[in-house]
Amino acid sequence: MRYAYFPGCSAASTGISFTLSASYVAKRIGLELVEMPDWCCCGTSAALVTSRDLAHALPARSLALAEQAGLDLDVVTPCAGCFSSLKRTVHYARQSDKNRHRLEEIIELPYAATADVMSLLEVMARPEAMEPLAAAITKSLNGLRVASYYGCALVRPQEVTCFDDPEDPQSMDSLMELAGAEPVRWAFKTECCGASHQISEPHGARRLIARVFENAAANGAEAIAVACPLCMLNLDMREAGINESRAVPFDIPVFYFTELLGLAMGGSARRLGIDRHFWPTGKAVRKALAPPPEPSPDNHSTSELPQEVTVA
Amino acid sequence: MSRIGVFICHCGSNIGATVDVPKVVEAARTLPHVVYADDNKYTCSDPGQQSIRDAIEEHDLDRIVIASCSPRMHELTFRKMLHQTRINPYLLEIANIREQCSWVHKDIEAGTAKAIDLVRMAAAKIDRDTPLYTTTIPVNKRALVIGGGIAGMQAALDIADAGYPVTLVEKEPSLGGKMVMLDKTFPTMDCSACICTPKMAEVGTHPRIEVRTCAEVEKVAGYVGNFEVTIREAPKHVDYELCTGCGLCESKCPTKITSEFDQGLGKRKAIYKPFAQAVPSKPTIDAAHCRKINEGKCGVCEKLCPTGAIRFDDEEKRSTETYGAIIVAIGYQLIDWADLYGEYGGRVASPNVITGLQFERLVNASGPTEGHIQRPSDGTEPKSVVIVKCVGSRDPHKGKAYCSRACCMYGAKHAHQYLDKVPDGRCYVFYMDVRTPGKGYDEFYMNTQRDGAVYLRGRVSKIYEQGGKLVCLGEDTLAGATVQVEADLVVLETAMVPADDADRLGSMLGVTRDKDLWLSEAHPKLRPVETNSGGVYLAGTCQGPKDIPDTVAQASAAAMKVCILFSKDELESNAMIAGSDVGLCNGCGACVAICPYQAVTLEEVTRRENSVMVTRTVSNVNPGLCQGCGACTVACKPGAMDLKGFSDEQIMREVEALCL
């Protein structure tokens, strides 16, 4: 498993925990990520509202440079926003030679659009990754009730993303199950987190976060797993603020799915970046890693608290 | 040497506006063998036809070309005209200079040039036309109706009342179809069962109608007037000759199964009548669930039956009979929304998200709740109901692009019924448009709004359970706002889609299916109940979504067509059919494989070839079955197969006239 890697702007900043945990997991399952040369901003929603050409040209430039460097690999990106931008560009370029030539003209580089773009979630949910994952997972997460939150960009529009069910996706749920967590059946898997409206339209957008927590709580979730740095930021950073106006506050920590996989592989909270979260994760991590309360003779669980667990 | 007459039609300004007709006439006069050419304002009119007849006499014409509208429009008209002359009706070619020329072009010069090309091709082709003659085939005056819903029953009754015997085949244990599941019918709110069950009884007792339930059509051979149909009857495990329908067996049967008739909301026994007024009013054993049949234990029904009618060893029956005409009335089914709408909960949706047909059973006095509207999850009365229209219809992205036609009224009826039974309840209807064409329909919809139903224009984007309620997220596009409605019960008005059997039956009968698998009528306007297969007619929703009045009207129309067919003792066969040249045929069988009507067979012939008697396998066309589609002529490698009126020779002359 070898992929070209498009980190995106959040990888070394707001999404550092995603990077830490993803590389921890990748190393243990033989997933090699080769960073693309001189990659630039994917354009995100800002480029899309500015100019359609710009929104396609920015990802095309990064993809074309990888081609030029002889990086004959499919592209993987951890960020759902980058995934959406890159995937949209490949889709556009493959629609017609006219489209592709237009991009080549703008970026002044040849671009063949041969490489596919995948999200990190899609790559990890593939059978060739699930197998080594199953082998590398040494601890069960003790049936921690995890609500998998895919957000809007990973599965939609389906004609472009070609990944999982757009209304009731299952890939992250099966990864959580593999790690010994109990996937929560809930209704808000693909609802919007408010994205950047949380900054520009905070009043209306906060409600979008609140209802995600509401539905997760109503369905008994003890944690939420995400696969997008912006979902993470919006949920994790703003949970405290949302609780200020609630009689009964939420207490649901938010994890990158790779963090939970890493925990199940025996990784420490510090190593995986879990100690960098805003909302305390201690209770959920303790439940996930606690030895079964009354071990019976036929229970083969080997859960033990790892030596280096540090809890935020 | 042929003597061709060419007649160019202006069709008012339909052709005249884009084609310079006098110029086409001029050009036609210069074509080989054309001895006369003229134009006419309306060729199909009486004076138009008379002028052709006069020209035939005056100029001793022996074949004619008419350049006008599509042959689908008036070829038959002009053939009938030729019947009154000495020219064979098949020595006629139509050059379509309207639909395929004047209507689709704007430039007069180019339009005229194309019209001249089309006329030149037709004149070249008709030079090689030969007279064709029809033969007669006998008509077997028995009708087969497939499907015992309201359409099939109406058609069977009409044909039987006209004096012809009918066999009605129904795959379920009872007649009635979907209509008998409905509680009330819009817009008059008369009880569906009250108007449907008398028809069922009438069908069941009619001296000229033979009803076969639990039966399916397995094989159809033959052609109009002479269909050989094999009907398979599943074992009922009850001897209907002995059974009196007392119901003792059903009351004591220990096995309870989800009722199909109650749409999964109620229970039935393993020996059962689907509903109280079933016709025939006798039970059948569901072999898949019967303990005696599966485990060898029980047999209570057999012990109790006062007439000894139970037959656990009953077997499937097959019979082959001859019919002159077939009416297909296999109806519809509802789209499986759960696979398409994950946002409404999909396969793991709340039990309180139900379909319109399930609501019908809930609100029906003989339904599982005796007409009390209750939530399937806990049996409580819902205080707020959301009705979602266009689920699976008018939604090409998820379901079907077409409008399902009956659901606007169906939804309004459900809202009305709910508000009638739960006066303090609230009812919200999400809609895209309200389409209520029909007598008394819009008035009904207005009344429903006056009843208090809140109509919200927009689709529902999500339905999920939270806090014991079904939260419906949607949009009110008139207010320009998103809305959230908390409901106790959600009713989805789902799209009608073709019955499972439509594809299989369609290909067996040679009836084409449209892109959504609805069975296709022969002409969308002028032949709405006929199909492209002679002697096969359509009734009801198998042809497309419709409500009960339209279904009944179409069923009577189909019955009328059958009666017209049966009013003759013999039929004129199609003259333009395929024929094989035995001398050229090498018996490869490509024609047999490609024929959609099973009209071509291989047979052995012994004949003299090069002074020697030889026996060879060659193809043979059944003139009753052949519909003249021409597929075999293209598949035939040695060029033995020719379509009369469209021979390879004629087509080549046409191509030469265009290209050389």
Image (cartoon, coloured by chain):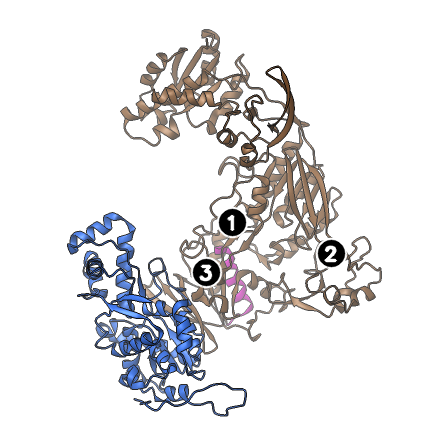
Chain colours: A blue, B brown
Mark 2 touches mark 1? (CB < 8 Å): no
Quadrant of the rendered image containing residue A184: bottom left
The secondary structure that most of the magenta stretch takes on is helix
Label disc, if present, on residue B545 of the rendered structure: 1
Q: How crowded is the residue under tag 1: few (<14 C-alpha within 10 Å), some, or many (20+)? A: many
- Distance between the alpha carbons at the discs numbered 2 and 3: 36 Å
Q: Which chain's residue wears label 1?
A: B
- Residue identifier under label 3: B340
Q: How crowded is the residue under tag 3: few (<14 C-alpha within 10 Å), some, or many (20+)? A: some
Q: Position of residue A194 (x, y in %)?
A: 29, 72
Question: Was residue B421 drawn as part of the magenta stretch in this picture?
Answer: yes
Of pointers 2 and 3, the one earlier in the residue sequence: 2
Dot 2 lies on which element?
Answer: loop
Quadrant of the rendered image containing residue A255: bottom left
Question: Was residue B362 drawn as part of the magenta stretch in this picture?
Answer: no
Q: Is residue B621 above or below residue A258?
A: above
Label disc, if present, on residue B236 of the rendered structure: 2
Q: Residue at left 25%, top 74%?
A: A198
Label disc, if present, on residue A234 of the rendered structure: none
Mark 2 touches mark 3? (CB < 8 Å): no
Q: Are marks 2 and 3 on the same chain?
A: yes
Q: Is residue A34 above or below residue B332?
A: below
* Left or right: B529 in relation to B95: right
Q: Are marks 2 and 1 on the same chain?
A: yes
Toward the viewer: B138 or B442? B138
Residue pushed farthest left? A108
Q: Which chain's residue wears label 2?
A: B
Q: Position of residue A16 (x, y in %)?
A: 25, 78
Toward the viewer: B178 or A20? A20
What amino acid is labelled 3 in the image? Leu
Dot 1 lies on which element?
Answer: loop
What amino acid is labelled 1 in the image? Pro
